[in-house]
Image (cartoon, rainbow, N blue to C red):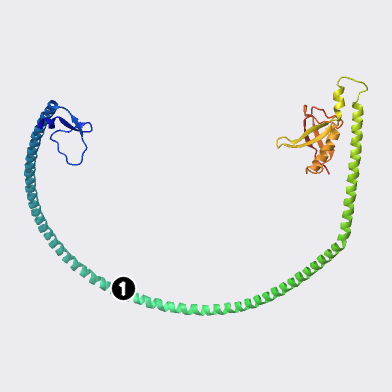
């Protein structure tokens, strides 16, 4: 029934579709129940809206037809104006063609007069050229004769010059051949002298090698004997050094022991214990030697131990007197007779420069 039809409304999203809209493609709508009264009200409003739109469409169509008629009248006026302009242009073009024809005739007449003038001028120029050609031929003939005379003299001079050059070349060739023979003799003499000098040098070298071969066994034996003696001297020096060190340590211990019990006897009795001293040769690079001495040892004994440790660690052979130990508190040089203080955990050392 009509009442049921108008009770529902179709919505596309949030917009309601009017009752007179057409569906031209696939669409998705939502059904919404609005009731018969509201549906009738919407139907009436849609009908009024449709009537207004139809009326506006009729007015627009009428205006479009009137505009089209006005456009047609305007186009007809433009066509008429264009036709009149073309007629005027054609008339102007005909007048221009007539004027151009007159100008062509005037130019042709002027060209004819100019051609006559040019023809008379050319005839005069031909006569002048003929006269000039004859005079030029006379001059050329005279010049050719003079040239032939000069060429003959030049040819005679050239033959004399060639003969003189040939004689000079022959003399030069003879001198060059003589110089080359002299150069070859000089080179042969130098080669002979070089060969003789080389042979003398080889003979001297052979004699030197022979003498060295004869002297080598004696030198090897002498070197071995010297090495053995040096080794024995070092061993003897090491034994002497050990004995002196032991005597010095015994003397230090005897001097350090008190006659009776005094305060601090426990520390004095512990001097036989070993003390580890770190000696830095370069603190920035952390280059150091670690030696162990008995408590109460002297700085001189510490230097001797440093020399031995340097030889063992690959720093090279050093003498004890080359080491300069510095006081850890004042930075002054320590005397060899100074006793190593138990509080000296590390010391700095410098090397005296070797002389001779």
Residue 232 in the figure: left or right of residue 155: right
Is residue 309 or residue 348 the one in the foreground?
309
The quadrant the C terminus occupies is: top right
Is residue 328 or residue 132 the one in the foreground?
328
Residue at the image point whose x is 31% and y is 75% from the top: 133
Residue located farthest toward the top when viewing the structure as drawn: 263
Is residue 150 or residue 302 the one in the foreground?
302
The quadrant the N terminus occupies is: top left
Determine which quarter of the picture holds residue 291.
Answer: top right
Looking at the rendered structure, the number of numbered marks drawn on it comes to 1
Residue 71 vs 12, above or below: the answer is below
Residue 138: x, y in percent?
A: 35, 77
Residue 269: x, y in percent?
A: 87, 26
Determine which quarter of the picture holds residue 341.
Answer: top right
Residue 187 in the figure: left or right of residue 168: right
Local packing at callout 1 (Cα closer than 10 Å; few below 14, some 14-19, many 20+) is: few
Is residue 200 or residue 99 the one in the foreground?
200
Residue 311: x, y in percent?
A: 81, 43
Determine which quarter of the picture holds residue 209.
Answer: bottom right
Q: Secondary structure at mark 1?
A: helix
Residue 258: x, y in percent?
A: 91, 23
Residue located farthest toward the right when viewing the structure as drawn: 259
Residue at the image point whose x is 6% and y is 46% from the top: 76
The residue that label 1 is drawn on is 132
Residue 156 vs 91, above or below: the answer is below
Residue 348 in the figure: left or right of residue 151: right
Residue at the image point whose x is 78% and y is 36% from the top: 290
Residue located farthest toward the front when viewing the structure as drawn: 1
Residue 158 vs 256, above or below: the answer is below
């Amino acid at each position: 029934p009509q009442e049921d039809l108008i009770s529902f409304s179709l919505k596309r999203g949030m917009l309601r579709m009017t009752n007179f809209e057409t569906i031209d493609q696939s669409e998705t709508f939502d059904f919404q129940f609005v009731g018969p009264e509201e549906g009738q009200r919407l139907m009436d409003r849609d009908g009024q809206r449709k009537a207004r739109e139809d009326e506006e469409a009729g007015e627009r169509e009428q205006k479009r037809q009137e505009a089209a008629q006005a456009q047609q009248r305007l186009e007809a006026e433009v066509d008429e104006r264009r036709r009149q302009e073309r007629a005027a242009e054609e008339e102007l073009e005909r007048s221009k063609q007539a004027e151009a024809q007159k100008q062509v005739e005037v130019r042709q007449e002027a060209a004819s007069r100019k051609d006559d003038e040019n023809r008379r001028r050319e005839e005069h120029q031909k006569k002048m050229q003929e006269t000039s050609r004859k005079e030029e031929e006379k001059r050329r003939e005279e010049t050719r004769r003079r040239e032939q005379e000069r060429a003959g003299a030049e040819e005679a001079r050239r033959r004399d010059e060639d003969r003189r050059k040939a004689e000079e070349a022959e003399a030069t060739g003879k001198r060059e051949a003589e110089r080359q023979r002299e150069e070859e003799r000089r080179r042969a003499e130098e080669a002979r002298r070089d060969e003789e000098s080389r042979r003398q040098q080889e003979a001297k070298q052979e004699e030197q090698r022979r003498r060295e071969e004869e002297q080598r066994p004696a030198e090897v034996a002498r070197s071995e004997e010297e090495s053995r003696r040096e080794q024995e001297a070092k061993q003897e020096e090491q034994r002497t050094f050990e004995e002196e060190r032991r005597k010095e340590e015994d003397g230090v211990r005897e001097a350090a022991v008190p006659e009776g019990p005094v305060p601090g006897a426990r520390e004095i009795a512990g001097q036989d214990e070993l003390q580890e001293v770190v000696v830095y040769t370069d603190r920035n690079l952390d280059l150091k030697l670690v030696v162990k001495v008995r408590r109460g040892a002297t700085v001189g004994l510490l230097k001797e131990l440093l020399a031995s440790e340097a030889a063992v660690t690959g720093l090279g052979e050093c003498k004890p007197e080359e080491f300069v130990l510095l006081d850890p508190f004042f930075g002054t040089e320590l005397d060899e007779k100074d006793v190593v203080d138990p509080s000296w955990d590390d010391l700095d050392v410098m090397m005296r420069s070797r002389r001779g």
